[in-house]
Image: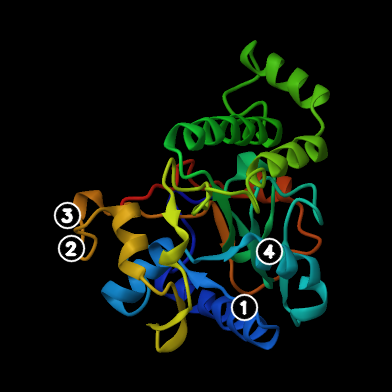
Amino acid sequence: MKSDQPYNYDLRQFQLRSVVLLDAIDKVCKEHGIKYYVIAGTLLGALRHKGFIPWDDDLDVALMRSDYDKLVEHAHEWFPEPFSIVAYNNDLSYPKYFAKLEDKSTTLVERFYLGYVGGIYMDIFPLDSVPDNKLLRAWHYYRFNLKRRMLYLIYRDPYKHGKGLSSLWLRLLQKLVSKEGLHKRTHKVLTEFEGKKNCNYVMTHDDGFKAYHKSVFGTPQPCEFEGHTFCAPEHPEGFLSVLYGDDFMTPPPVEKRDSHFHDYCDMEHGYEGVDINKLKANYHGTDSLSRRKK
């Protein structure tokens, strides 16, 4: 059945269903001595609303690179069903440079044109070291951003804008560039400053050219989110003021409350065995982009 709605699910139901992902990562990280932090809109929602930002459905956590790698490496051992961490090194159909924790008992398509189907998810970002020097940091981010753009292009539906001449160069690019190779080159850029001197800042690399002093994170502090207690940075205001500005506790006007709606969501059935092309043929969502106006 086709739908003219920009999304096909109840936002509040989706939010509450997603909280189990935070419960899962909180339990696993505490069991194995790993520090994690809620960040971005999740952290802002915790401070400003004690839960989700009412018009948003994002869940974001971050870990220092060494903890991130350990979590991804042992995910198949540590997470019980129906939870699964997906990353490029365990699923080459996955188009992102960071990992997601997914609920395998659900089905979700973030964007049909990226060709990936998974479950309701939470983004898990590595916090990678970057130079104190802003010029070196800018050059690093520029190189990373080229790789990220390339990742988008080699995963994107070449016919997103039609089957004319504009699709030919993209189809050629996708034949010439190895997904695995590009992911590895992106990872090399992301981690090039780990363990080096004069690198007291970290980036998620998802926030544009924004860097956070490592002291912002420190010892995880408890924060309330939807009636549960999770881990926030030691100095949450230091993170949020960099990302959203000093007035982060003031909600934006209604016309600027952008939401991150997904193209398709089924909260009752798992995604294993689902054919994304059949989903796309029978249901269309929105091509709107996720933005950071929280």
Residue corresponding to mark 4: 66
| Residue 274 in picture, x, y percent from top left | 76, 58
Q: CA distance from mark 4 to mark 2?
A: 35 Å
Which of the labelled discs sits on residue 253, or is there none?
3
Q: Are marks 4 and 3 in contact (CB under 8 Å)?
A: no
The residue furthest front is 197
**Residue 9 vertical placement versus 155 (above, below):** below
Q: Nearer the viewer, mark 2 or mark 3?
A: 2
Which of the labelled discs sits on residue 25, or is there none?
1
Q: CA distance from mark 2 to mark 3?
A: 9 Å
Q: Closer to the N terminus: mark 4 or mark 3? A: 4
Residue type at mark 1 is: Ile
Residue type at mark 3 is: Pro
Q: Residue at x 41, y 61 (%)?
A: 40
Residue corresponding to mark 2: 250
| Residue 166 in picture, x, y percent from top left | 62, 14
Q: Tell me if 132 is positioned left or right of 252 in this view.
A: right
Q: Residues within 10 Å of mark 4 (few under 14, many from 20)?
A: few
Residue type at mark 4 is: Ser
**Residue 12 in which image quadrant:** bottom left
Q: Residues within 10 Å of mark 3 (few under 14, many from 20)?
A: few
Q: Residues within 10 Å of mark 2 (few under 14, many from 20)?
A: few
Residue type at mark 2 is: Thr
Q: CA distance from mark 1 to mark 3?
A: 33 Å
Q: Closer to the N terminus: mark 2 or mark 1? A: 1
Q: Nearer the viewer, mark 1 or mark 3?
A: 1
Q: Closer to the N terminus: mark 4 or mark 1? A: 1
